[in-house]
Image (spheres, rainbow, N blue to C red):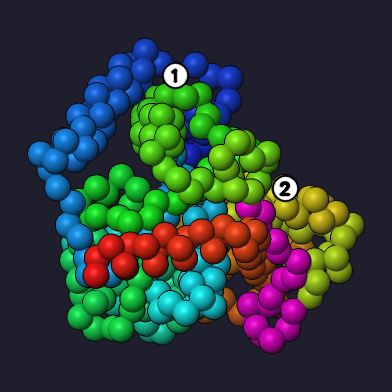
Amino acid sequence: MGSDSIFSDKSLNATWYGERRPAWWLRALSALFKSVVQIRRGLYASGLLSGTRLRVPVIVVGNITVGGTGKTPLVIALIEALRARGFNPGVISRGYAGTGDALLVVDERSSPLSVGDEAALVFQTTQAPFVVCRDRVKAGRVMLDKTAVDVIISDDGLQHYRLHRDVEICVIDGKRRFGNGYLLPAGPLREPVTRLDSIALRVCNGGEAQPGEVAMSLVGDEAIAFADPQRRRPLREFVGQRVHAVAGIGNPERFFAQLRAAGIDVIPRPFDDHFPYAEKDLDFGDGLPVLMTEKDAVKCRAFTRLDLWSVPVRADLPDGFFDAVAQHVRQARTAAG
């Protein structure tokens, strides 16, 4: 689990989303970071720096805050919705710790520890072509060389301006919104909130959607046994039962709240985002069921204890949102000839 150091998830969240005022030096660094962000964006906006356009439309799904906002379930839903509308989508991502500058084509043998837990989860759920590389332009080009995709989804990368994008989707945490309003490291923002003015498609995950935002909810109503994925239990069967809830995601409280709302007696077990689990990390010594997010569970498939359960979620959005995305893609394809 995360430590209580000043840069641990626990400490940062207390500053970014709590009542604790950021230290003066954090605010100074935040001001410097904001200047760098604005200069860089200005260089691209003015044409002094230019993005690289791929030969198929590109959709970027990202956020302007650090941490989990629900991008991965949205990417999965987007893949399924685009397929239903006649497209053949693929996904690119920069990956996570350990990938370095390597380019990795995700397949059934890919380890979440090498390609990233999000990439492994998206591929296992959708079987959509997926390429991981810090250089997203390179990832896109390799995908186009190796597959017949006709639209590319960039999982994250809203701030990766070197890759030209035809559609931008920003996912907003409807509960936490933008925290204390500071940019990194004093707050959770990667870019100023005014960046939203340039993004046509804004999705609000949970909470109350603001004007111009599309409401999204994450629906999870069953648990899947690690020992036997064919064994499934409706969450209602855990009502009133005490369980350990494990979440190593950007906002663990979202998962805990989901289980509590289902009437489950939760013992919260938060871990740092992208935590590399060993089976002993999930041994709490009392034999109670252990429920964890699907993103965490993808790293624990080798664990076969009978008390371990995964709780998958799916993103629920109006069909009109996906129709709008598809229309943007068609327009981009037409414009490109």
Whether residues under marks 2 and 1 lie with C-beta atoms below 8 angstroms apart, the answer is no
**Residue at image x 31%, y 67%?**
334
Residue closest to the eye, 212 or 175: 212
Estimate the x, y position of residue 125 in percent, counting from the top left.
52, 76
Estimate the x, y position of residue 115 in percent, counting from the top left.
34, 68
Position of residue 264 in the picture relative to residue 114 (left or right): right
Residue closest to the eye, 155 or 261: 155
Q: Is residue 18 above or below residue 65?
A: above
Residue closest to the eye, 3 or 16: 16
Question: What numbered label is drawn on residue 257?
Answer: 2
For the residue marked with disc 2, what is the amino acid? Ala
Give the structural element (helix, strand or loop) at label 2: helix
**Residue at image x 66%, y 54%?**
217
Marks 2/1: CA–CA distance: 27 Å
Magenta residues, as a range? 216-232
- Residue 283 appears in the figure: no
Give the structural element (helix, strand or loop) at label 1: loop
Q: Is residue 143 above or below residue 22?
A: below
Check the image and name the residue furthest to the right. Answer: 240
* Residue 67 is one of the magenta-drawn residues: no
Please tell me in which quadrant of the rendered image residue 332 appears.
Answer: bottom left
**Residue at image x 43%, y 77%?**
87
Check the image and name the residue furthest to the left. Answer: 48
Residue receiving disc 1: 22
The quarter of the image holding the C terminus is bottom left
- Residue 44 appears in the figure: yes
Q: Is residue 81 above or below residue 239?
A: below
Question: What numbered label is drawn on residue 166?
Answer: none
Position of residue 137 in the picture relative to residue 108 (left or right): left
